[in-house]
Image (tube, rainbow, N blue to C red):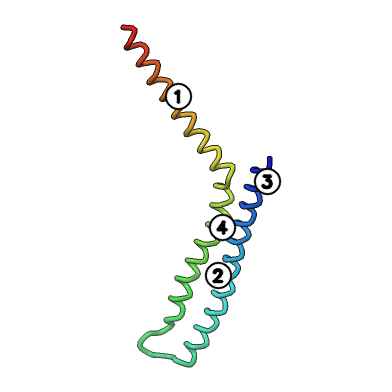
Amino acid sequence: MEKDLHEQYEYARRRIKQKKRLYFHFVLFVLSSLLLFVSHKFLDNEFITQWYLWIITVWLFLFILHFIKIFITDRFMNKDWEREQIDRLVLLQQRKIEQLQSKIVNDELK
């Protein structure tokens, strides 16, 4: 009981930390995008037009990947999913061991 409570607490703490990092990433993205936009207006170069849009686009893509990881992937692959996968794999291993043991016993009887 106490172990489950501790696991729930650790999971909640980890999720809050992930969301906190995501929000920080978003604020940093918005402020940096504004800074890039303003710097482009002051450092306008005819050779490379709208260079800041490439940086913002790549950064936005990375932010979207971060968002998907936090709110989509981690939601479906949480502790319960992990536990089910572990239980399934342990059960498969136990079945294989039982099959091997029965094969050994049958071979010894022959």
Q: Residue at x 45, y 80 (%)?
A: 52
> What residue do we see at 52% from left, 62% from top?
66
In this rendered view, identify the residue nearer to me: 47 or 77.
77
Query: Mark 4 to mark 3: distance in Å?
Result: 22 Å
Q: Tell me where residue 37 appears, x and y as whole percent.
A: 51, 84
Residue of label 2: 25
- Most distant residue in the top direction: 110
> Between residues 18 and 26, which one lies in front from this camera angle?
18
x and y percentages locating residue 96 in the rendered image: 41, 25
Residues at discs 4 and 2 in contact (Cβ within 8 Å): no
The residue lying toward the viewer, choosing from 24 and 1, is 1
Please name whichever residue, 40 or 13, is drawn nearer the observer in this view of the structure: 13
Do the numbered discs 2 and 3 sit on residues whose CB atoms are within 8 Å? no
Q: Amino acid at mark 4?
A: Ile
Which of discs 4 and 3 lies nearer the camera? The answer is: 3
To which residue does mark 1 refer? Answer: 95
Q: Say what amino acid the circle numbered 3 marks.
A: Leu
Q: Nearer the viewer, mark 4 or mark 1?
A: 1
Residue 30: x, y in percent?
57, 76
The residue labelled by disc 3 is: 5
Label whose residue precedes the other's in the sequence (2 or 3): 3
Mark 4 neighbour density, 10 Å: few (under 14) some (14–19) many (20 or more) = some
How far, Cα to Cα, is label 3 from label 1?
A: 31 Å
Label 2 residue SS:
helix
Q: Nearer the viewer, mark 2 or mark 1?
A: 1
Q: Earlier in the sequence, mark 3 or mark 1?
A: 3
Q: Residue under label 4, please give it.
A: 70
- The amino acid sitting under disc 2 is His
